[in-house]
Amino acid sequence: MVQYAAIATLLGCTVVYAAPTSVTSFSDAAITKVKSNLLQIATHSWEIGTAMEALTELEWPSLSVFGGSLPPPVTLAPGTASDIISWTTKIVKAKPNPNALPIIDGDGAVGDPASIGVAVELTNWTRADRGDHEFSTAAGHQLTYLLDVAPRTSDGAISHRSDQVQLWADFVYMAPPFIAYFGALKGGSGGLSLLQIAYQQCKLYRQHLRDPSGLWKHIVLGNGQDLHHWGTGNAWAAAGMLRVLQTISHSKLSSKMKTEQADLKSWINEIVSASWQYQHANGTLFNYIDESSSFADTSSTALLAAVTYRMATLTGDTGHVSASDKAYNLIKASVDSNGWLRNTVDPETFNTPSLAGSHSPEGQAFVLLLQAAYRDFKAS
Ligand SMILES: *[C@@H]1O[C@H](CO)[C@@H](O)[C@H](O)[C@H]1NC(C)=O
Ligand SMILES: *[C@@H]1O[C@H](CO)[C@@H](O)[C@H](O)[C@H]1NC(C)=O
């Protein structure tokens, strides 16, 4: 594969990087292995939702919020998004109780089942059987649960947990992108108010979780807080706000929400800029980003690099691309020949490395999100 410098020369333009790092892309074969491993091990609601988002961005980019305008087309060419649609179909048709509000069991989390909602909305919108209302009902129930049933803080932030009011940075990737997507498809004043709610939730979560350095705490309020600046939590927050931003800007309501889009951009940048200050020489971030006693974590490094490439594509500001290039190389070197991402944090303890022989479903998905973001950056 060619390096950036070579590409720049070919195109006859001048590209200046602060610290040029040569990057060669993952091979298609490596990405195929990463993906098939992901599909084998994604079982929890948030892992499934994140996997669906990764597949959409990687394989069906025009249907992702980074691609085409919203709403998506009503009719898809045969085979399009078939992997996503068959997965959502399996989940929605297998709902043990069709009247249950969340799409799937969330292990006590409010936000996580909603992560599947974008794919359910897409399935409803493009379904071949126009008489089938099950997807619409499932998505509507999920929204009702978030907006009308889940506990909240007194200032209106929707709790990430169902049994107590507690805010997790993770929530920002799970629920606001779904609320926004629902709004973009609905359109009109009802759609606008949903886009506003998605934005407001990002704003409230930032108010509760952000520290002066720009990094976000992981979990606040209630029992079992984690006040550290968890790498994956910061990545979830930045990547979730980015999806909300892109959903707004690709919707028909974009012109009505200019200041909100500017805010989201600056909030994403705040996390990205603060994080890369702590990047280590080999490209990695640490699990607790700003703690030297923590350990190297490829999961958060991959997702923050994905956000960085996407922001550079969006804004034309390549100031952090040398950091994401270094991260990309580190991630490439960390995927073994069988397609497993090594050196991940255990996504369920948050503060210990994955045990030997066990793998991170979300880490696998982050590699695909990184690859899609890198590809789109290079193409721009
Ligand atoms: C499902 O799609 C139909 C169009 O076929 C649309 O009218 C309906 O609002 C959608 N439901 C949801 C919850 O978005
Ligand atoms: C990257 O560097 C950190 C120390 O800064 C180290 O802990 C980690 O193991 C290194 N990662 C790789 C893949 O070499």
Image (tube, rainbow, N blue to C red):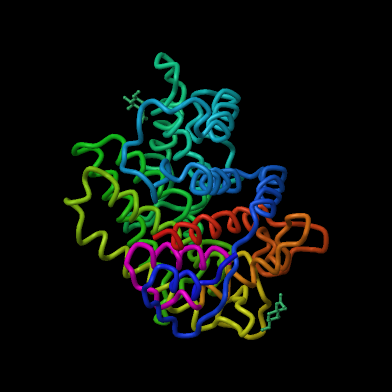
Q: Is residue 42 above or below residue 207?
A: above
Q: Residue at x 45, y 27 (%)?
A: 77
Count the numbered circles shown: 0
Q: State which quarter of the image contains the C terminus.
A: bottom left
x, y percentage for residue 43?
67, 43
What is the x, y in percent for residue 167?
47, 59
In terms of image quarters, where does ligand 1 lie? top left
The residue sitting at 19% across, 39% down in the picture is 189
Q: Residue furthest top?
A: 131
Q: Main secondary structure of the magenta part?
A: helix
Residue 72, percent from left and from top: 35, 36
Q: Compared with residue 325, is residue 152 higher up or lower down, i.e. above or below?
A: above
155 or 125, which lies in front? Answer: 125
Residue 318 magenta-highlighted: yes
Residue 275 among those drawn in magenta: no
Q: Nearer the viewer, residue 281 or 120?
A: 281
Residue 343, horizontal then vertical, whole percent? 72, 68
129 vs 204, left or right, is right
Q: Is residue 58 left or right of residue 345?
A: left
In which quadrant is the N terminus drawn?
bottom right
Residue at x 54% of width, y 35% of height: 84
Magenta residues span: 302-322
